[in-house]
Amino acid sequence: MAELQKKRITVFGGSRCTADTDEYREALTLGRLIVESGFEVCSGGYAGVMEAISRGASEAGGHVIGMTMTQFNSSPNPYVKTIEPSESFYARLQKLIVESAAYVAFRGGMGTMTEISLVWNKLTMNVLERRPLILLGDCWPRAFECLREHLVISERDMTFLTFAATAEEAIEVLTTQIR
């Protein structure tokens, strides 16, 4: 991997959580922990989890990248240091995925599921070399049990996912698997 890929942690998550939620506070903590562990943070750069992760990283003195889309009329959150605009959702996804050493996903909507699915698929097909894909929060184990029950997902496929209950568990995975 290139040096950039060794250092960038991309975080996926919904745009609808607010600063008064546990999810926002957990993302804020993870942003700080990522920076304290020597990595840079990358996200979509907008609101919700993306703002919280950016804020935590920025307040810890870290570098924050926002992968935005030119077709949106929204401004990135104020904690983003570097804006990398893309012309389309697919171009944005490609940059988010290829240029990262690991991924952490919080609860979100269809966009978050799309991001997780694409990374997971590329990992299982060996299109990407193996790297951490961490699903953070109590919603994920049950969601993936449901997927396994109704879709064709093998035990090998599941080995590409790591479930974490807290930001501290997620950072433990990142620091032991990337360094």
Image: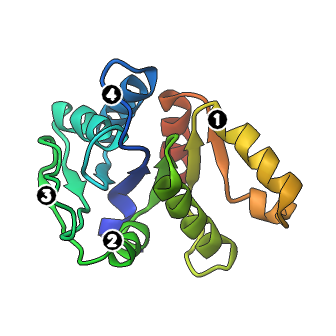
Task: Identify residue for label 2.
Answer: 92
Residue 63 visible? The answer is yes
Residue displayed at 26% across by 62% down: 67
Task: Identify residue for label 3.
Answer: 82
Amino acid type at circle 3 is Thr
Amino acid type at circle 1 is Cys
Residue 160 percent across, percent down from the top left: 68, 59
Give the label on residue 139, or none.
Answer: 1
Q: Between disc 4 and disc 1, whose residue precedes?
A: 4
What is the distance, in whole Å, between disc 1 and disc 3 at their CAs?
Answer: 31 Å
Identity of the residue furthest to the front in this view: 73
* Residue contact at pointers 1 and 3, CB within 8 angstroms: no
Residue 124 percent across, percent down from the top left: 69, 72
Residue 59 percent across, percent down from the top left: 17, 31
Numbered disc 2: secondary structure: helix
> Which one is closest to the eye, mark 3 or mark 2?
2
> Which one is closest to the eye, mark 3 or mark 4?
4
In the rendered structure, the answer to whether residue 43 lies left or right of residue 68 reads: right
Q: Between disc 1 and disc 2, whose residue precedes?
A: 2
